[in-house]
Image: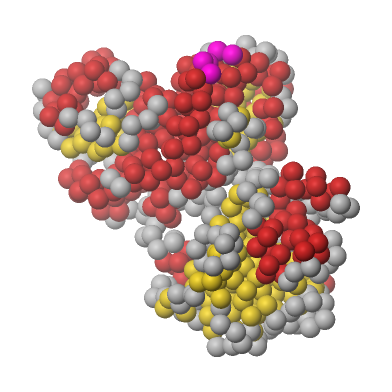
Amino acid sequence: MCGIVGYIGHRDAYPIIIKGLQRLEYRGYDSAGIALFDGSDINLSKTKGKVEHLKKKAEESMSLKGGLGIGHTRWATHGIPNDENSHPHISNSGDLVIVHNGIIENYESIKKELTKRGYNFHSDTDTEVLVNLIEEVKKKEDVKLGHAVQIALSEVVGAYAIAIIDRNKPDEIVVAKLGSPLAIGVGENEFFIASDASPFIEYTNNAVYLADEEMAIVRLGKEIKLRKIKDDAIAYPNIMELKLNIEEIEKGGYDHFMLKEIYEQPRAILDTYRGRLNVDQGLIKMAGIDDNLERFMNADRIIIVACGTSWHAGLVAEYIFEDLARIPVEVEYASEFRYRNPVITDKDVVIAISQSGETADTLAAIKLAKANGAFVFGVCNVVGSSIARETDAGAYTHAGPEIGVASTKAFTTQITVLTLVALKLAKEKGVFPESKYHEFLIELESIPSKVERALESNALVEIIAEVHKNATNCLYLGRGYNFPVALEGALKLKEISYIHAEGYPAAEMKHGPIALIDQQMPVFVIATKKGHYDKVVSNIQEIKSRKGKIIAIVTEGDSQVKELADHVIEVPETIESLTPLLTTIPLQLLSYHIAVMRGCNVDQPRNLAKSVTVE
Ligand code: AGP
């Protein structure tokens, strides 16, 4: 996610803002910038790269004076990481300058309208459109900045946290929030603006957190007044006294980044389909597919290449593509694919999945596929990463930076993107009934709230983790769409708790693994109502008759498995193809709690790196 820092007060803004941006580096970013008002003009410097680069560039090129300024660390969503796309962005007149964290979904239509009115754009970002929309409203309605922001924001669709200043009104900063976090630090005759409290906690622990659709005009010497963007209602700020330390703030109050990222999944899934899924119009809009539809429609097959958790997401995609779009799919470990001299033709579409966009084996597999004429589509979480640049087209997950080595929100957002692609192709091919298609879109839109409900099992999962934290071996079983989830659950446990675990198709038990079952063996079985439920129940009975310990992930209200299992964890009901987005949640929590109980380093497990950039 991007990071915002602003300051207005009696001190020099520059050092406060730079240090504040460094405090926000943990959020992950690819460029940074700062704008300062020196009493007569706005001075601005921004650059691709780290805050250190920005510091050097600013100190060589601009006046660092002034008690008013805003700064930004950018995690690219629209437009690759480069100097022009970095924030702050300045309006055409040069009067307004803005920093923004979020996604303006309808920025293209607004940009078209503003272009018609003579506005010019120097970047590919939605943010530059927003600052010029505010300028246009301010001019046309002849209103002050605060009112112009209010009118403009009622026209945009998306998520935002913004800070904006007007060089003709240098005694205020206007801020607004919807969907992305924004805090105001309240000092003695000074105010701080930031994405979280880490940039200002050393100056003040008094903070106001804006609620969604709230804005504020932060003016020196004045009380903060909050206003509802939609209806102008005035709200008086609740100034909280923070008792968090820096590290706790970076983790959003969670003990570990992994747990924070598990709980970010409802927002991450929403952000991933935001601007792509239009349920009312029954549309899925993905430029990477729309612009290359022929290649997908005429493909003999889809080959998915990935590693680790991303490979598990690829397995889920295999079931979805073949089930919905009737396209043959093969899923390959990138490390195997690149060396086994595979048959690849120009009728193949290769989908490369990678959170980091830097995994060496996946990158090599892409190059091999391209060298043999295949069309390569990337699904990455890091804009402008090597894989994103190497592939012919792609679609980003909008999970935000994933800091914990164990992939969690990357997995569910990869599945979300791949589900959108499969649905789009199924509709284009006319192989999916219209009524089922609409039902699917509605259900997909309900997933973030169902993930929230699945997360409510956390306390129960912690109790189960306590029972099994000393296991030496575990089995994970699933059928159909949930077979890849069983593999993923086993990987999660292995990589952060160091307990050996294996995932298997539930029906495979009879072909060997059932010999492992005894009273010491916890068996985690995904037994949701959809998809071969009765067969999974008989697998559970086979395990029970051999005294295995059974922990089942079931659909809410299940009573049959409850009679058989030692523990059941319920997840909401959904369409069979979407169950992985829910059944993976308790398994992520389980591995997290067991690892914590075993005193493991959850965010940086031994021997592992977040991105395997070497063979
Ligand atoms: C999963 O929890 C691990 N972090 C690992 O398996 C990871 O999924 C794999 O290394 C692939 O990384 P990528 O998605 O960045 O390519």
Magenta stretch: give its range: 430-434
- The answer to if 197 sits in the magenta stretch is no
The quadrant in which residue 568 appears is top left
Q: Is residue 521 visible?
A: no
Overall secondary structure of the magenta stretch? loop
Is 340 left or right of 440, judged from the image as shown? right
Q: Is residue 157 above or below residue 165?
A: above
Give the residue at x 49% y 42%: 269
Q: Is residue 598 above or below residue 142?
A: above
* Number of numbered discs: 0
Q: Where's residue 514, x and y in %?
A: 20, 21
Choose between 316 and 467: the one closer to the eye: 316
Q: Where's residue 304, x and y in %?
A: 55, 24
Choose between 415 and 26: the one closer to the eye: 415
Q: Is residue 282 visible?
A: yes
Is 62 left or right of 343, judged from the image as shown? right
The quadrant in which residue 14 appears is bottom right
Q: Where's residue 6, x and y in %?
A: 63, 72
Quarter that holds the N terminus? bottom right
